[in-house]
Image (cartoon, rainbow, N blue to C red):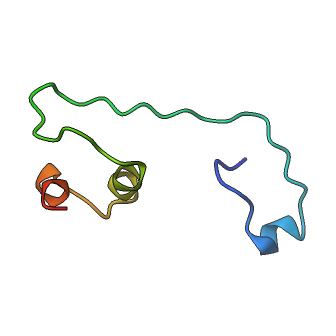
């Protein structure tokens, strides 16, 4: 099982069948200094490219 698309090498040896789609909710404190967070910024947070809110404030 994987929560991502199969890589080409994996797809060559197994059949991928979607059985569910995950949902992610981002919840932050009301005192957070950001007014808006883009999908790209959330992606960077979950991939570890951004570690603090300050990194997003300067964008």
Is residue 18 depicted above or below 41 in this figure?
above
Image x and y of residue 21, in percent: 67, 36
Residue at 73% across / 68% down in the picture?
A: 7
Residue at 72% across / 33% down in the picture?
A: 20
Left or right position of 21 against 51: right
Q: Quadrant of residue 11?
A: bottom right
Q: Quadrant of residue 10?
A: bottom right
Q: Quadrant of residue 35?
A: top left
Left or right position of 5 against 11: left
As drawn, which residue projects farthest toward the top?
30
Image x and y of residue 57, in percent: 14, 54
Image x and y of residue 30, in percent: 15, 25
Is residue 21 depicted above or below 53 in this figure?
above
Residue at 55% across / 32% down in the picture?
A: 23
- State which quarter of the image contains the C terminus: bottom left
Residue at 48% across / 34% down in the picture?
A: 24
Image x and y of residue 26, in percent: 36, 34
As drawn, which residue projects farthest toward the bottom?
9
Left or right position of 31 against 21: left
Is residue 46 depicted above or below 9 in this figure?
above
């Amino acid at each position: 099982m994987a929560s991502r698309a199969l890589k080409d090498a994996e797809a060559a040896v197994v059949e991928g069948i979607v059985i569910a789609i995950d949902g992610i909710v981002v919840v932050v404190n009301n005192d957070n200094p950001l007014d808006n967070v883009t999908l790209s910024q959330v992606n960077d947070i979950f991939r570890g490219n951004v570690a603090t809110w300050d990194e997003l404030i300067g964008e």
